[in-house]
Amino acid sequence: MRKLLLEEGRLGRYFTYALGEIILVVIGILIALHVNNKNLEYKLKQEEIAILQSLLTDLKSAQNQSQRGIDNEDYALFVLNTLLKEKTERDDLLQEYNLDAVLYQAFWNFEVDVPVINTYSYIKSTGKQDHISNMEIRKRFNAIDMGINNLSFLIEDRAEVQQRRIDPVVIEQLNFVRLLKTDNPSLEMNLGDTNQFDLIVDNPIHRNMVAAKLELTQSVKNFRVQLARDIDMLVEMIEQELGDES
């Protein structure tokens, strides 16, 4: 057609026809780019949904971990508080408990687990946190990540006090064989004499140790509670985000 128009000398029609072809090509390219962008947006959105679903699964597991941690801290606080009460009140509270088990909890045991969110660690290491379009969700994940790190530091501080101050007392002044039996009843061993319970818990140094562990445990529990609230809130946000996408 272009050759025929040139041969006939119809330059105006030739340029109009050529311009039309160019416009059609440009329109075709724009349509292709638009379709490609839409496909890319859809792919990124599907990837974001998959990431959020995986994060939600981890967060719900972290909720259970948090509650177990809080329950264990509550039991530890109950035991430690009980040991610091007056003897008559303490004896009344401890009638239904195995005294060796109480001493084991007070002088040896403590909760060390922290919530784990594996998916978030993975997307951070791969740079995929940018795939989460909701900035508030990303911000809260960063806050929870920092909270978990801070909780780990608090637990390490408590462990250091335990190892440096309390463990030597357990080894040197308590019948640890009896305490160990309460934690693992299947063990066969000579338990030896009954622990001198009152002598241990009425000793001022021992009471100070219990009080120090009580203070550290209360701090850890408070931090666990706040972290659990943050996790609960983020679960709600992600569920709403996924609901809006469905």
Image (spheres, helix red, strand yellow):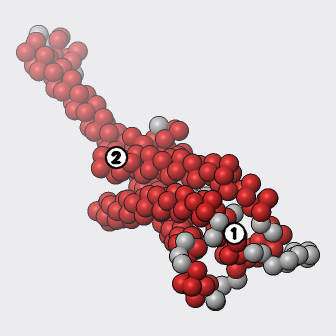
User: In the rendering, at what x and y percent does residue 210 appear?
Assistant: 59, 63
Q: Is the residue 25 above or below the residue 71 in the image?
A: above
Q: Quadrant of the N terminus?
A: top left
The tag on residue 116 is none
Amino acid under disc 1: Ile
Image quarter (top left, top right, bottom left or bottom right) of the C terminus: bottom left
Q: Nearer the viewer, residue 182 or 8?
A: 182
Q: Nearer the viewer, residue 2 or 47?
A: 47
The crowd level at tag 2 (other Cα within 10 Å; few <14, some 14-19, many 20+) is: few
Q: What residue is pinned by disc 1?
A: 200
Residues 29 and 147: in front is 147
> As rendered, which of 134 and 214 lies closer to the eye?
214
Label 2 sits on what residue type? Answer: Lys
Q: Nearer the viewer, mark 2 or mark 1?
A: 1
Q: Quadrant of residue 68?
A: bottom right
Q: Residue at x 73, y 58 (%)?
A: 169
Q: Which mark is residue 139?
A: 2
Please give the name of the residue rendered at 77% of the width and 75% of the height, measured from the top-left corner.
195
- Vertical arrangement, residue 70 with respect to residue 89, above or below: above
Q: Residues within 10 Å of mark 1 (few under 14, many from 20)?
A: some
Residue 105 in view: no
Check the image and name the residue furthest to the left: 12
Q: Earlier in the sequence, mark 2 or mark 1?
A: 2
Check disc 1 and report its element: helix, strand or loop: helix
Count of numbered marks: 2
